[in-house]
Amino acid sequence: MKTSRINHLIAFAFLLLLSITAGAQVASAQTPDPGTTGPNAVTREEYNYGNSVFRPVGFPISVEVRASIHYPTTLGNGPYPVIVFMHGRHATCYRNTTATLRWPCLSNEQPIPSFQGYDYIAQTLASNGYIVVSVSANGINAYDNNVTDLGMQARAELIQHHLGRLNTFNTTGAAPFGTKFVGKINLAKVGTMGHSRGGEGVVKHYVYNASLGSPYIVRAVLPLAPVDFNRPVVNNAALQVVLPYCDGDVSDNQGVHFYDDARYNVPGDTGAKHTVQVMGANHNFYNTVWTPGMFPAGTGDDWTFVTSGSTDGHCGTGAGNKRLTSAQQRGTGLAYLSAFMRAYVGGETQFLPILTGDAPPPASALTTNLHVSYHAPDTTAKRLDVNRLLTSTNLTTNTLGGATTQSGLTPHDLCGGASPQPLHCLPSTQSTARQPHTTASARSTLRGLSQLRTGWGAFGSTYTNDLPLGARNVSGYQAVQFRVSVNYNDLRNPANTPQNFSIVLTDGAGATSSVRVGDVSTALFFPPGTVGPVPKVLLNTVRVPLTSFTGVNLSDIRSVKFNFDQTGQGALLITDLAFASAP
Amino acid sequence: MRLVNTARRRRGWKSILLTTSFLFLFSTCSSLAFAQDAPVSRPDSDTNANQEVTVTDILKLQGRVLGEGANTKAVGQHKVKSYRVEEVTLPGMKEVRIKGETRTVGKAFRLTVKGGPFPVRALPPVIWLDDTAIGYGIENEELTEITVITYDESALTEGATIYLSYGDKKNKEDRTALPEKLKLNGAKGDNQ
C-alpha cells in the first residue's frame, strides 16, 4: 500500500515535470531567436561634424558630433525604426598602447572609437530592418567628472542633438548623406541603449526629451551595466536593465534602481519593465573596443579591479570558474538587446516571452545562465498587484486590502525601503556592493527597494495573502509572479544549494493547487561567489503559469500561499507579488 | 614656492571666463560623508554673470604646495604612489557648503593622488582621509593623477591616511591606502 502510494507520487511528479518541460519546449519552439541575422543587406557609414562642435549647457567644453549608422542597404521599406546607442566612460585617446583622457586628442594620438564597440549588435538589428546610430561621447568622458551630475545632462543633450541630425536627414537631407535618408527614418519609433555611464545617459535622455514635449517618441530604453548616480526614472516606455553579475566596475549593480524606482512611480504606467541578470558577465566585454585582444589600448577585464578577484570561484580565473568568454557575453547582449528593441520599438511581439522569462534564453545568447525580472504595465488587464510590500501595513494587509498572515516565519519584516525600514537588508558586515537594491547613489539620497525579509526553520511554515471580494477572478492573467532572492547571508540557506518551496492557490470551494517554484524557475539559486561584490542579493522574477494550477477555479481564488514545504529551513528576500500577463 | 598645477591642460582666461557657475546647478547632497557639501546652487545661466570659478577652472589655477609625498613605488590594487596638497587662491569669493553650512571662501585646496596609470571607470574615484570621503576625484589627462577639490581646510588632517577607492567604499578593504600619511609641513593655517 505504502509502496503503491510512493509509486503514484513518483509517477505524478514525473508527469508534472514532463508537462512543464514540454511546455518550456513548446515556448522555446514558438519563440524565434531575435539575435539571428535578418534578410537585409547592411551598409555601415559614419558621420563626423568635428571634435568640438556641440556644447551641452553648462558643460566645460564643446564635444564631438560623430556617429556610426547601420541601415538596410536598399532602404526599400522605410521608414525604419531607429535605435540609438551611447557608450560609457572610457579613455578617450591613444597612441600605440597608451590610453589618455583628454579631448580633443593630441596630434600624435587617435580617438578611441568606443562607439564602434557595439557594431556586432547594430549589424544584426539593421539586417532585421532597423536603422542603428551609435554616438561617440569621448568629449563628455574627458570632462564629466568635473560636473556635479557626472555628465548625465550632457549625455542627454548629445543624444537629442543626434536625433535632431537624424530628423534633418529624414526631412530635408544633409551632408554627408544628401537625400538618401529622406523619409526613411521613423523618429516616432525610437529605442535607446546606453552602456555604463551611457546607461544613465539614455534614462536621462528619456526624461529630457519628455521635458521638451517628446519631439521624438522613445518607446524603449535599455541601460546596460549602468550607473545610476542621479536616479532619473523612465515611465510609460519599456525599460530593460542588463546587470552583469561579475561587473568589476559598477560592481554594486546600482542600475537595478532604474527598475525598482519605476515600478509604482506613475499610476497607469504603460511601460513594461525588465531586468536581465547575466551570470559570469563583466562590465567591459559588451564593447569590443574595451575588450582585450580586440583593440590596442585601454582594454581590460574589469573584474581585475576587485581586490583578490581572481580567486573567486564564480567570477575569478581559477579552474571551474563560471565566467563567460567575451564572445558569450556579447551573445547575451545581442540576444536580449535585440529581443527588447525588436519587441518594443519594432512591434515584433513574438520576442516578448524571452523578456518575460516565459521562454528560455535564445541560442544567440550563447549561455543559459541568466535570470530575468518582469514588471507588467499598470493596466487592469495586465497586472493585479497582490502585495507590493512597500510599507509595514503590507505585513498584515496587502495591496488589495486582503489579510496577510504568516506562520513560523522569522524574521518577517521589511527592509531596504523608506524610513523607518533599515537602510539595508543584510547586516553591516556585508558590503553594500552585495546589495544592489539598496546601494547608495552618488548624487541622490533616495533609498532603495522595500523587501520582505523572511525565513523559516521548519517544514510547513507559510506566508499567505488573501484576495478580497472583487479581486478573486484571476483567470484573465497568465501567471502569478513575485521577485525573490535567496538570502545568502542567512545560515539557514545551505551554501551553493538552491532553495525551493510551493505556491498554493485556494479557491472559494476550498480546493487547492500547488506548484513547486523550483519546477518552473531557477530564481531560487544560491548566489555564487565569495570575493568582493559577490555574492549578491538581486531579486529575480518567478512566474508560475496559472495553467499549472489545476483543479482550482481561477475565477474565484481566495488566497495565494507560499508553503515552505520543500526544505526544512531557509531565508528569502521577496517583493512584488502579483498576477500578471505579458505586455 | 609656487607651482603650476598640471592636472589639466592650461587654457586661457578667456576660456575660463566663458565657463560659468551652471556646473553647480545640479549640486545636491551626496550620500558620501564628504567633508564638504556640494557648492551652493547658482541658478544663473551660462552667461557668466557671476564669473564664478568652476571646478575645471580650479584645476588649472596656480597652487601653493602645502605638502607632498616622495614615494615612487606603486602599491595596492590601484597602483597609488604618492600625494600632493595645494592651496589655491580663487579669483573671487565663492559660496560653498561646508559641513552643512553655507560659507564664503576665497581659497580652495587640491588633494592629488599620484600613481597609475589609473583606469577610466564608470564609478568615480573617491579620495579619503581616514574615514572621511573628501570628494569625487578627477583624473588628469595622462591618467597619472587624481585630484579632489575641497574648500574645507579642516578636512586636511595632519597624519591622516590617504585612500583611493572607486565609488562609495566605506569598507577600508575596498580602498587602497597610500604608503605615506598626510603631512602638511606646517604650511597649513590661516587660509580661510
Image: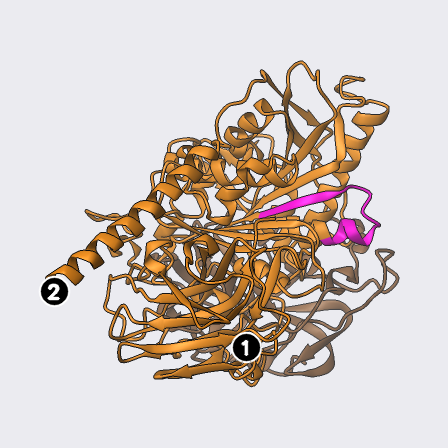
Tell me what residue is drawn at x 39 percent, y 43 percent: A23
Chain A: its colour in the image is orange
Looking at the picture, which amino acid does disc 1 mark? Ala
Looking at the picture, how far across and down is residue A94, in whole percent?
Answer: 51, 35
Label 1 packing within 10 angstroms: few (<14), some (14-19), many (20+): some
Looking at the picture, which amino acid does disc 2 mark? Met
Chain of residue at mark 1: B
- CB contact under 8 Å: marks 1 and 2: no
Q: Quadrant of residue B60?
A: bottom right
Looking at the picture, how far across and down is residue A156, in whole percent?
Answer: 71, 48
Q: Which chain is brown?
A: B
Check the image and report above or below for A409 versus B122.
below
Tell me what residue is drawn at x 60 percent, y 35 percent: A342
Check the image and report above or below for A29 versus A413.
above
In this view, the mark in front (1 or 2): 2
Q: Is label 2 in a helix, a strand or a loop?
A: loop
Q: Which mark is residue B33?
A: 1
Residue A515 forms part of the magenta stretch: no
**Magenta segment, which residues?**
A207-222
Check the image and report above or below for A403 versus B46.
below
Mark 2 lies on residue: A1
Tell me what residue is drawn at x 57 percent, y 49 percent: A582
Q: In front here: B115 or B171? A: B171
Check the image and report above or below for A183 versus A199.
above
Q: In front here: B72 or A68? A: A68
Q: Is residue B69 visible?
A: no
Image position of A95 (left or right of B12): left
Q: Quadrant of residue B171?
A: bottom left
